[in-house]
Image (cartoon, rainbow, N blue to C red):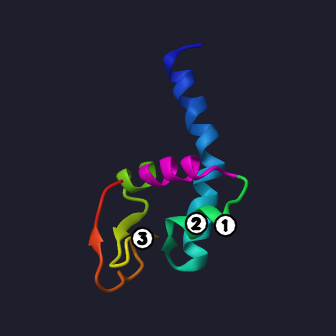
Amino acid sequence: MSEQQGEDLIMASHTPVTDRILGAVQRTHGCDLDTLTNSLSDLSWSQVFLEVDRLSRDGQVLVTFDTVGRYMIRLPEQKEGSATDDVRL
């Protein structure tokens, strides 16, 4: 298998997880990481975290840290809540 085929396979395997995460964030108009993970109960916390990290680096979601210590995930066009600081996972 070529390197390109391997990369294509990896990207294809991420698509369903990506769509589910983006859909959940869109439906909730933003949520914290634990709520997101609980709503995708067939995925591990690590799977959700790694995909949210990738989506954040790609600019598809924004991750902020709220005043009570939770990572909040929202889509870029959604309004930011009060008292949050942008962070990168």
- The answer to whether 54 appears left or right of 36 in the picture is left
- The residue at 35%/69% (across/down) is 64
The residue labelled by disc 2 is 36
Q: What element carries label 3?
A: loop
* Nearer to us: label 1 or label 3: 3
Question: For the residue marked with disc 3, what is the amino acid?
Answer: Arg
Residue 88 at what x, y percent from top left?
A: 31, 56
Tell which residue pokes out farthest to the bottom in this image: 82
Q: How far apart are marks 3 and 2 (CA)?
A: 12 Å
Residue 59 appears in which quarter of the rendering? bottom left
The span picked out in magenta is 43-53
Residue 2 at what x, y percent from top left?
A: 54, 14
Q: Badge 3 local density, few (<14 within 10 Å), some, or many (20+)? A: some
Q: Are marks 2 and 1 in contact (CB under 8 Å)?
A: yes
Q: What element carries label 1?
A: helix
Looking at the picture, does residue 18 appear above or below residue 26? above
The residue labelled by disc 1 is 39
The residue labelled by disc 3 is 70
